[in-house]
Structures are given as structure tokens and as C-alpha cells.
Amino acid sequence: MKNDSNQRILVSSLIASSLALATPAIAEGEVVFSSWGGSFQDALRSAMLEPAAKKLGIIIKEDTTNGIADVRAQITAGAVAWDITEQALSDCARLKQEGALETIDYGVVSTDGIPASLVDNEWIGLLTYSLVIGWQAEKFGENGPQSWADFWDTDKHPGTRAMFNSVAHALEAALMADGVAPAEVNTVLRSEGGVDRAFAKLEDIVPDVTVWYRGGSQAAQLMADKEVDFIHIGNGRAEALNAHEVTVGYTWNQATTDADCLLVPKGAPNRDNAMLLINEMLSAEAQARMAVAISYGPVNAEAFQTGLISSEMAATNNAAPENMKAQVVIDASFYVENFAELQERFDTLIQQ
């Protein structure tokens, strides 16, 4: 869902010539960056984009994305408008398979502090996030669903529901609702009959899901407008709402954890500036500022050594070890291998 301002322009002031001579990475021109909109993109702008624009001396234009279909549409039309876009990790891998991405220039982009599992020759991790079970705290206090079994139990927890319109996260939630322990979810999902079991359980909740939302901005708006009582929502979106007096209760128990990555679509018009911006966004300082601005996990482990993230903030971050204990990490490789078939089956189910 588009932001009220579809394209914001961040213009850095020109650096005095004496300083420019001492700064090795000054560029010129522009770069177009696309992300998920709403409070998340507001945080990203203040924590990453504005400082990068000032340091690099470039214009950063912004747009919003609803996911992989937007990237495909631009490439198919031969009209690539984005130089960088943020996408879900599994979608980054799928776009690579389709030959839709430029190669990341690791002569420019530093991988210091970033785990090897999030470094690919055509994409690189940006942050981790968790989709948590959330509820309207003003209405339910601390008595919201504490597990997926609770979320599925419409007698115990009557009310309207929203879930993310993606087979990834939904199948994991369904298996946990069916009694699978978080630590066993990915094993069961890959086992014979595991997918069928997940879809059978998912079918039980479909009639009670009011909205299958397509992006984090829409999820936040649903809660802000009190259109739904219970939701599978990004932890950072929930915290952002709480900071603006929309009280969202949530639990880390049985949250589903994933990562977003940065990629450069094939044919991007400003590839060189894209590499410079990616490098800035992955620096320890930028990653730390982002974790402070919105509570998603940095991919650069050195962010926690900058002194910008307090111990209190670290303890409430989705990537903190204590918070990760009862979460499920989405198996991106499983969805790359099986996505088309699974998503088609999912789409057919929720449209009934």
C-alpha cells in the first residue's frame, strides 16, 4: 500500500569543497530506493537514507513496494524505475533464479559483521524481523491469544482476525496451531504429509480471517483503525503503533522470524550509486540507528558494539536470544524450492 507521499526526495546539502577533498566516497546524481512504506520506511529514512544522502552527496528518491510482483512487472515492461528495493529473503532468492538481478559489487559493499547465510552474489540481507501474534490491548488487556492454538480458537478468543497474505508464515502458524512445537516446525513441514497437514489446519481458520493483508503498512493501519482484533504483525510495526498511543499487545511465543534483503533489479539505471547506498545501509552505525528507530534485528552484528543500542533496547529486540527461544525461523530454501505450487494452493484456499 502506497505511502501518502509515494516519492519523497532526500537531498543532501553540498559538502564544502575542502571537506569534499578529504572524503573518499563522494558521488553525484541520484538513486531510487523502494521499501515497505509507513512507519517502517519512516524509520529507515531517518536512520539510513538521510545520513547516507548527506555522506554520499546524492539525491535519494523513495517509492514503496508490495513485493516481488512489482519487481517482475518493471523488468517485464523494460521500464526498471528502482535502483534498489527491499524484498523478503525468499523472494530475493526467487528473483535470482529468474535472472532478474544485478550482481552485487563486493568491491564496494562491505560484508563485515554480516553472516555468510545472508550474503549472496546478487542480494544481501538488510534486517531480521518477527511476525508476532498481536491484539488490541485496549480491548483485551493482556488476555490476547498467547499461541497459535489460541488464535485458531474462536470460542476462547472471539473477534476479527487478519493474517499476512503469504504462504510462508501461514503454514508455520498452522502447524503450531495443530500442536507442533516451534523447534520441530521446519522438520515437519519438509516431511511427508507435512504440507498437507498445514493446509488442513489452515483451512479451519480461513473463514474467520477478515483480512489477508499484503504489507506491513496495511497491517499497521488495520490495527490503528481498529478494523481487526487479532493479527499476525511485524513486531516493529506493533512497537511503532504503541509509540503513537495505539496499544497493541503481542507475544514472542511462536512468532515467525524472517529476513529482508536488498537487491538491484536487472537494468537499474543508477547501479553504481545503488552499490554505494547499500554499503552505507549495512554499516554498523546505520544498522544500529535502525534498531533504535524501530525494533527489528540488525544483520550486522557489529551494530551492538557501536554504543548506540542500549542494553534495554537490545533485550527487547526481536533478534535477542531470549526472545528467539520460542520463535520459528522461516526456512527460505524450502520456499524457493516449492513456492509456486504452495502459493497457488494458498491463494486458492483463501479465496474460497
Image (spheres, grey):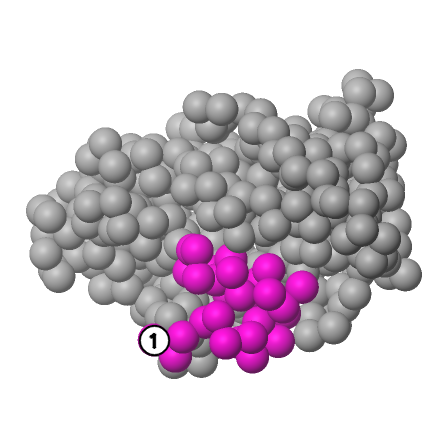
Please state which of residues 176 and 267 is positioned toward the viewer in this rendering. 267
Please check the rendered image and state whether residue 293 is part of the magenta-colored stretch, yes or no. yes
Tag 1's secondary structure? helix
For disc 1, the marked residue is 312
All told, the count of numbered labels is: 1
Q: For the point 74% across and 73% down, which residue is it?
A: 112
Relative to 311, say whether 69 is above or below. above
User: Mark 1, residues whose alpha carbon is within 10 Å: few (<14), some, or many (≥20)?
Assistant: few
Please state which of residues 100 and 303 is positioned toward the viewer in this rendering. 303
Q: For the point 77% across and 53% down, which residue is it?
A: 19
Is 139 positioned to the left or the right of 179 in the image? left
Q: For the point 38% across and 56% down, which residue is it?
A: 235
Please check the rendered image and state whether residue 328 is part of the magenta-colored stretch, yes or no. no
Where residue 114 sits in the image (x, y, percent)? Answer: 69, 71
Q: For the point 67% across and 43% down, which residue is it?
A: 53
Is 174 positioned to the left or the right of 249 in the image? right
User: Magenta segment, which residues?
Assistant: 283-312
Where residue 252 sits in the image (x, y, percent)? Answer: 33, 67
Q: Disc 1 residue type?
A: Glu
Q: Quarter of the image for the C terminus: give it.
A: top left
Residue 350 visible at all = yes
